[in-house]
Image: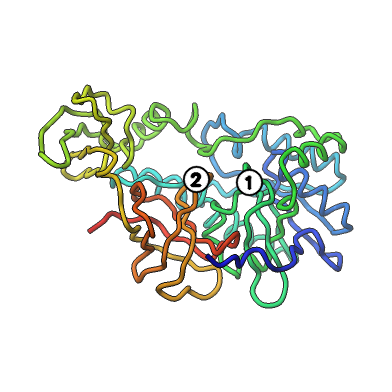
Amino acid sequence: MPAHGAAGRDTTLCETRSVRILVALSGGVDSSVAAALLRDEGHDVVGATMKLWGGASDSGCCSVSDVDDARRVADRLGIDHHVFNFTEEFEDRVVAPYVRAHAEGLTPNPCIECNRHLKFASFLDRAIRLGFDAVATGHHARVVHDAGDPRLLRGADPAKDQSYVLSCLTARELTWLRLPIGSLTKPDVRAIATRLGLVTAAKPDSQDVCFVLGGSGASARERFLSERLTMHAGEVVDHSTGHVFGTVPAVELVTVGQRRGLGLALGGGERRFAVSVDVGRRRIEVGGEDDLLATGVPLVQRTWVASPLPVGTEVLAQASAHGRAWEAVVSAGGVELTTPRRRVAPGQTVALYLGDEVVGSGIARKAA
């Protein structure tokens, strides 16, 4: 397997000249330290917090307390701070597609869509219009700016690596992006924040879905979606025999690969999983672990950091933020897996790597 990401100088923390950088201050410790490091390097740093979600939030990213924490960090660092209101864009590009995906039986990844459309589109465009030379975030990943196109690499801390959620970015966005903490571990980041007396030093990490109150479990999703979507009961049938086991109250909440929460005594002693979800037919097919295995992942909305990789290129495919990367080969319609693996839920992003380097991504689609 090629180890493309092992080479190249990580210049994320090594700007050779002072530049104007707009830092996305989320109110968390990572972005706080990112701003501090860039300030200490002598750059002209300004902080900006994105107001994204207009409703209540208890899981970080979008709450009033996060804006206040970001402002206090900026005051401590002696940098200007602004708030950008992107609530309409967030509703249109993240929340509405999230609801629509559930209505279609897909498993969306709203954090990646937020990165794609808000943090590295709306925010970046605003920074460019305001005359900044670069933008920075507190993501645990690395951008290498050397000869040729910029490259995106995994972060130094494997437990906190966030390159997966940035896999939708292209060279255009990466050209503007600085990731100051990508070469640090999380304990390093917290130690710096403590030394600087930042209010965010011991603040817990935010949860994934900022607009779903109570976390990202099925009950929280159901409460949120029930206000925006009509739920439908669905029958649960055996994938092989067609035997009907019973029903679930909301087929829109079931995801491929799910075992718990189906609320059925399926019997037989064999563990069964959802292997397909058909909202239109109000039908969920269940099967054993072998029925979940797939030899490939069909992808739509494929993006490449630079040039598309040729069909037949060996890559690593990762289907969740902290999941294991699988050996795969680029195909005309997605990737083929060298070993059968558990099926990726349609709607999930699959990030593609050469070694530690992100080279592209796509969204898993339903098999024809």
Where on the picture, by quarter, is residue 136?
Answer: bottom right
Q: Which residue is mark 1?
A: 158
Report helix, strand or loop for mark 1: loop
Q: Residue at x 37, y 35 (%)?
A: 225
Residue 100 is at least partly visible in this image? no
Residue of label 2 = 323
Residue 18, image x, y percentages = 86, 65
Colour approach in the figure: rainbow
Q: Image point 54% across, 58% down: which residue?
A: 167
Q: Is residue 334 above or below residue 286?
A: below
Mark 1 or mark 2: name the one nearer the start of the chain: 1
Q: Amino acid at mark 2?
A: Gly
Q: Which quadrant of the figure contains the C terminus?
A: bottom left
Q: x%, y% of residue 243? A: 10, 34
Viewer-proximal residue among 314 and 62: 314
Q: Is residue 202 above or below residue 8?
A: above
Q: Secondary structure at mark 2?
A: loop
Drawn side of residue 254 relative to residue 368, left or right: right
For label 1, the crowd category at 10 Å Cα-Cα, with few meaning under 14, some 14 to 19 and many 20 or more, is: few
- For this view, does 22 lie left or right of residue 365? right
**The quarter of the displayed image where residue 20 is located:** bottom right
Q: Is residue 124 left or right of residue 112?
A: right
Where does residue 77 sit, x and y in percent of width and height? 85, 44
Q: Are marks 1 and 2 in contact (CB under 8 Å)?
A: no
Q: Nearest the camera: 335 or 206?
A: 335
Q: What amino acid is at disc 1?
A: Pro
